[in-house]
Image (spheres, rainbow, N blue to C red):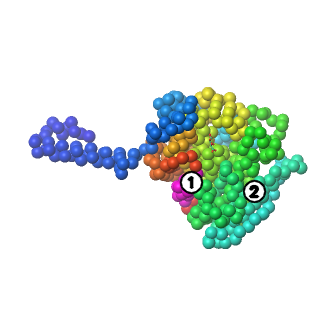
Amino acid sequence: MASGVLTGSLTQQSAMNHLRLTFALVLAASSVATAHGAPQTWIAKQSVIKANQKKRPGFNFDESKVPSYKLPDPLVSATGKAVTTVQDWKDSQRPAILKLFREHVYGVRPDAHYTVVHKEVGRRENAFGVGATARQIRTTVKSNDKSHSFDFVIVIPNSDAPVPVIVHINNRYLIPIDKTVDEFDPFWPVEKMVRRGYATAAFHTSDVDPDEPGRYADGIRALLDDPGTDQGTRWRCLSSWAWAASRVLDFALEQPEIDSSRTAVAGNSRAGKTALWAGAEDERFALTYSNESGCGGASLSRRAYGENVARITAVFPHWFCERFTSYSGREEALPVDQHQLISLLAPRAVYVGSADEDLWADPKGEYTSLVKAGPVFDLFGLKRIKQPEMPPLNTPRQVGSTGYHIRTGRHNLTEQDWGYFLDFADSIFK
Ligand code: GTR
């Protein structure tokens, strides 16, 4: 403000005016900062920080103790060359980053020969009073005379025109067809999606590959793995679940009612990590939604805030490739960080959700990762979130191909999260 200039030529009257003006400006500024008492950017509450510190001693929840770090630039090649064209990105940089994630984080998918058969095992017509059709499908994967099956439920609204589809990777349970139609579940609010014109399909991760370290023999990996390949880089659960999301998508795309250009993959927490990897591996997904995916998902590993590589690989040794464990306590040595995973989704759309009590998943790391993926969206000439400050609570931010929200409450996937996501999906698909 030019107050110094004003003060030099003040009469008494104008001094009063100046005082009034200054007072009004101060008031205006403070009302911008605290409109309705709400801050303009989210920061973790002290009480929540304390509660997290108490629950998980030995982990960092203090922003001032985040190590200083340097993120790999998604637009600089391994040899230090700047990537300046979409062609360069598609031909060399994207494949190179994808390879690093395969070999250091999620593992390499086996090159097995297999066949897939989808069989309808349940059907309900006229669901939700909008003429939606729900079907339970059994997917059987065969390889070398052995097979593994998992079920999913798909619900398609009645419509004159092809509809978009959301594949939900459900890390909690399979909701069988009757329950899907007759009971509301906020974790997968089918009726809400169907009424908004979306088809949706969901499977349970453990049906594909059991979510337990000792159950390798019972899952899809045992069926498809080649024992001759490198143990250190072999795929594990997260990658196998992402692979299954693609098999569900295969089926969805065979249905004439589904619009193949409007497809999304979504998941919460471990399934949010999986959704990001599914979107990276399978470019048929036009939109990826990762909710509270945290460490090994949307949040930056180098921040080591909340859950870190040492902890996640010790407690869930069956999720990431074995090599990822070697970065325990030395995140800065990783050849990639998670913003580059998000950058692999460009030029498609991506949505990230956080919760304010879920510091374990590092909301700030999730948001920053989305912003730092941005230069790749810029390369494609796309609009995207650039602001370094997070939005306030319960105030979704949507800019072009990227969207983000942080809502009040605990680690969970709620109807509120889905509502925000569907608003973003509408902006992308409609
Ligand atoms: C947490 C875990 C996270 C997250 C989550 C979940 O306890 O530390 O990485 O994946 O569980 O999947 O529910």
**Ligand 1 closer than 8 Å to label 2 CB:** no
Q: Quadrant of the C terminus?
A: bottom right
Q: Circle 1 sits on which residue?
A: 414
Judge by depth and name the residue closer to the eye, 345 or 271: 271
- Judge whether residue 425 is colored magenta: yes
Instruction: Give the farthest residue toward the left.
Output: 12
In-image side of 197 versus 140 (left or right): left
Which amino acid, mark 2?
Asp
Instruction: Give the farthest residue toward the right.
Output: 145
Q: Quadrant of the N terminus?
A: top left
Q: In this view, does 197 lie above or below 72?
A: below
- Judge whether residue 276 is colored magenta: no
- How far from the left and from the top, in percent, is residue 27? 27, 46
- How far from the left and from the top, in percent, is residue 300? 57, 37
Q: Is residue 64 above or below residue 237?
A: above
Which amino acid, mark 1?
Thr
- How far from the left and from the top, in percent, is residue 394? 47, 51
- How far from the left and from the top, in percent, is residue 303? 55, 33
Chief secondary structure of the magenta portion: helix
User: Whereabouts is ligand 1, in terms of quadrant?
Assistant: top right
Q: Give the residue drawn at x 46%, y 51%.
A: 395
Task: Identify the mark nearer the N-term, 2 or 1.
Answer: 2
Secondary structure at badge 1 equals loop
Q: Give the residue drawn at x 65%, y 47%.
A: 271
The stretch in magenta equals: 413-427
Measure the alpha-carbon separation of dots 2 and 1. 23 Å
Packing grade of label 1 (10 A; few <14, some 14-19, many >=20) is: some
Q: Circle 2 sits on which residue?
A: 151
